[in-house]
Image (cartoon, rainbow, N blue to C red):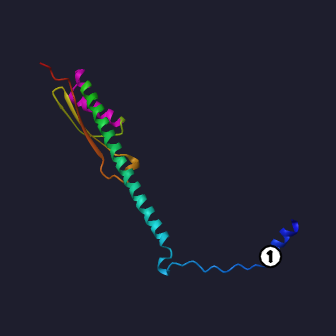
Amino acid sequence: MLRDVRLAAAMLREVKLPEVPPRATRSAREQGSGTVLTLGFIIVLCTVLLAGVALSGAVVAAHRAAAAADLAALAGAQTLSGGSEATQACVRAATIAGAQAAEVLGCQVSGQEVEVKVSVQLPWAQALIREPAVARARAGPAPEVR
């Protein structure tokens, strides 16, 4: 049996396999087209991701601005209900808005109601979103129910 194996191995060494013709090659014009297509796909993907980051930054800024405006208006209304003056209510509203990283753009007091307008700019999204998110809120005593 060992002799048969040696004989078979010797025969394989002597046998020359037929040459396989080369595969059909692409034309020179198509060389590297896969690289260009992949690069284009990566650029499109990065653009879509960047747009998603900008959109999510805008949504986060809008929510933060709304929350800051609500809290500032409530703080101003609470200050008014304690018997303070309108200027003290707006100062308190500005303090609360500042604690929420918001800037007060306007504060109006009419009767027992306080209306506050604030803006919020996210530092990490400043390069993508040029305009700050703006929100308004109004707070005061509940209307009388008849």
- Report the quarter where the C terminus lies: top left
Q: Which residue is mark 1?
A: 11
Position of 120 with respect to 12 (left or right) is: left
Position of 10 with respect to 24 (left or right) is: right
State whether residue 123 is above or below residue 106.
Answer: below
User: Is 38 one of the magenta-colored residues?
Assistant: no
- Total count of labels: 1
Please provide percent x and percent y for residue 83: 22, 21
Q: What secondary structure is the stretch in magenta mostly built from?
A: helix
Residue at (36, 35) in percent of width and height: 99
- How many other residues sit within 10 Å of disc 1, few (<14), some (14-19) or many (≥20)? few
Q: Amino acid at mark 1?
A: Met
Q: Which residues are magenta?
A: 79-98
Q: Nearer the viewer, residue 7 or 63?
A: 7
Please provide percent x and percent y for residue 69: 28, 35
Position of 109 with respect to 46 (left or right) is: left
The quarter of the displayed image where residue 62 is located:
top left
